[in-house]
Image: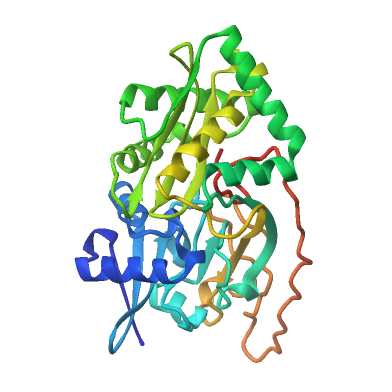
Amino acid sequence: MRISVIRPAELGPAEIAAWRRMQRSSPHLDNPFLSPDFTIAMGEVSAEARVAVITESDGPVGFFPFERHGGGVGAALGWWVSLSQGVVHRPGAEFDSDALLKACGLSVWEFGCMVDRQPWFQPFETLRQEAVVLDFGGGYSAFLDELRERSPKFLKSTLYKERKLGRDVGEVTAEFAVRDPARFRLLREWKSAQYQRMGRPDRFGKAWVVELVERLHAVDTDDFAGPLSMLYAGGRPVAGHFGLRTGTTMIGWFPAYDPEYAKYSPGLIQHLRMVESAAKLGVTSPGSGHQQRLGVQGRAVQPDRSSHRGHRAPPVGGRGGALAAHRAGPPGAAVHPRQPRPVRRRRQGDEAVRSAAHPGKTG
């Protein structure tokens, strides 16, 4: 097995094709944040973006996107906004985390939303959280029937508010994959204002995030797209959402609405309309019903690198937590891994309707 580290722009057509085949062959990897398109876009806005290409005699067997910072510290690619991270690989492939980090020039790699089934990083997990995954592969009508059975009060309330919004303001309409840049700016303005009201860092206060989402919004192919969905009442925009999709999976990312219409819950109405449009396009979400998908936080430590021996690695951007396993120590010492923290699970309510979601979601 050979590992070479390149910049995302250096990925060739054959490597991109292999990457897509790996995603299609493993549904849990069919996530737009794990796609070559997101990686390439990140490479266009960040000089720290890298990809480890893992190959065997018959070609690539895995791709590991990451950011390389100073002092041997690395982070998940686009860690501040990404909702899924890890190694994209052939089914059945096995990797050694120590060898992978060493080849990448890293002593530490910090992650925040690890995709499931990455056993090479499992010893370093510090927190697992559940998140709702919606399946609308059977069509919008089947999705509504299941939602009506599982969450009748939620659906009844949302549909009532949609009718009331139509009576009070004007006809309610929705549009999927809006290309208008002015509408996209409006959504970002709503979202920035929401961050400020909540006292949270404004993602769109960073120029590279704005450039990234604009680049992703410009992509619209069968394999990948950045659709902007908008909800209107009387022809006036009242809510919207910007997310990412592959050919079959859509991820919730930046939802926002005009607070003037908050009493109508326009964000929930918009999400139902978005699911309806996405289902018509053949987009689904892996799993069945309100399945639970794990999001994982932690730091992988490469133990034979002296730069971080004997102490905890500094957090990249303030994320992560205590190491689940701290194997490094002074020469000759008997080193025993710390026991991982107990898994903490948080069940999200039925009101969190979105096509697919992960803990720590940006929105």
x, y percentage for residue 195?
57, 29
Relative to 21, residue 292 above or below: above
Q: Nearer the viewer, residue 51 or 186?
A: 186
Q: Residue at x 56, y 70 (%)?
A: 300
User: In this view of the protein, can residue 77 be seen by the observer?
Assistant: no
Q: Residue at x 77, y 59 (%)?
A: 344
Residue 16: x and y, percent?
Answer: 27, 65
Percent coordinates x, y for residue 287 in the rendering: 59, 60
> Could you tell me residue 74's position as x and y percent?
46, 63
Please tell me which residue lies in front, 156 or 21.
156
Quarter of the image with the N terminus in it? bottom left
Q: Work out whether 249 lies above or below 262.
A: below
Q: Is residue 307 above or below residue 202?
A: below
Q: How many marks?
A: 0
21 up-or-down from 274: above or below? below
For the C terminus, the image quarter is top right
Residue at the location (24% across, 58% down)?
A: 9
Quarter residue 151 falls in: top right
- Name the residue at the bottom extreme: 332
Q: Is residue 309 visible?
A: yes
Q: Residue at 45% across / 82% down in the picture?
A: 93
- Quarter of the image holding residue 308? bottom right
